[in-house]
Structures are given as C-alpha cells and as structure tokens.
Image (tube, rainbow, N blue to C red):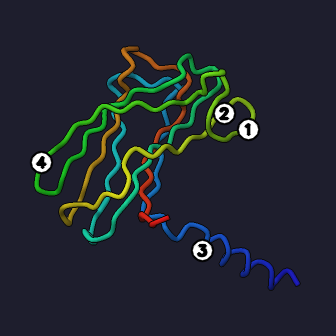
Amino acid sequence: MNKLIVPFLLLFLASCDNNLLFDENSSIDNMSWAQNDVKSFNYQVDDTLQACNFYMNIRHTEDFAFSNLYVFLKTEFPNGEAARDTMEFILQEPDGKWKGSGAGSLRDNSIMFKQNLRFPLKGMYRFSFEQAMREPQLKGISEIGLRIEKFQNP
C-alpha cells in the first residue's frame, strides 16, 4: 500500500504550484539586515509573452520593531538598463496582529508588489533588494526572497 501512496503524494505535491516560475530566498545573518547587505536574485527570461505576478518573501520574528518594511528594489535588464523602486510592505494589522503565516515567533509573508506584468526582453534579469528603513541594522528579519508566478485571470 505504501508503494502506491508515495508516488501519488509526489505527483500531488509537484502539481500544487504549476504557476510558479521562480521562488528563492536568501538568509539574513544573525537576523539583522544591514543597510549595505544587498540581496540579489537572477532570473532567466525566455518567454516575453507570459504575464507575471511578483512577490517579495519576508520571514521575520514577532520581535521585529516595525509594522512595515521599506525596501529599495533595483531591477537590472538584459540590455544593461536598470530601474529603481521604493516599496513599502505592511507586516502588521492596525490592531497589532501580524500578517502572514507562521509558527512560534516566526512569520512568513509573500506579498505581491507587481501584478500582470510582462518581461520586455529575453535574457537575464537581476533583482536586488536593500532595506530602506534608516536603521543601520534591522533586527528581526531572517530571510527575504523573490517569487515570480504566472499571472492567471480570475
């Protein structure tokens, strides 16, 4: 009986997230994100027709001192051009309840920051995140990451 369950379970898990194109996280040393600690992710684009949703993955402790997180995002295009954005991610409800999921004091968030966008060029893109909270060391952040999914019409 176990011989039948394992392949079925593997097939089920593999099919759960067929919209996922990219999902990678980077650990923050000592759960303290330094202002000069830039986290970068490279993504190869071969399909410029596929619309995508972009998410920032944020893992933090409930000891994080802020209800939001400001981040600079630099996007480097295959042709050498670059764009820079400042983004705000709300991590806590007005009533003090933390957003996201988690167990114990860790909270996981995957927050959409761009929806239904297409890559303009084929080639390698580089996404670089830098904390923008005016704190030399931002305590309580343990990982940040980038997630890219296929856009699906509701």
Q: Which residue is mark 2?
A: 106
Q: Which residue is mark 4?
A: 81
Q: Amino acid at mark 3?
A: Ser
Q: Which residue is mark 1?
A: 103
Residue 75 in the image: above or below residue 13: above
| Alpha carbon separation for disc pair 2 and 3 | 27 Å
Q: Amino acid at mark 4?
A: Glu
Q: Secondary structure at mark 4?
A: loop
For the point 73% across and 80% down, which residue is it? Answer: 8
Q: Are marks 2 and 4 in contact (CB under 8 Å)?
A: no
In the foreground, 88 or 129? 88
Q: Amino acid at mark 2?
A: Leu
**Left or right for 41, reference 119:** right
| Alpha carbon separation for disc pair 1 and 2 | 6 Å
Query: How crowded is the residue under tag 3: few (<14 C-alpha within 10 Å), some, or many (20+)?
Result: few
In the foreground, 110 or 7? 110
Q: Position of residue 64 (x, y in %)?
A: 58, 21
Dot 1 or dot 3, earlier in sequence: 3
Query: How crowded is the residue under tag 2: few (<14 C-alpha within 10 Å), some, or many (20+)?
Result: some
Q: Secondary structure at mark 1?
A: loop
Q: Are marks 2 and 3 in contact (CB under 8 Å)?
A: no
In the foreground, 123 or 150? 150
Q: Amino acid at mark 1?
A: Ala
For the point 80% across and 85% down, which residue is it? Answer: 4
Q: Are marks 1 and 3 in contact (CB under 8 Å)?
A: no
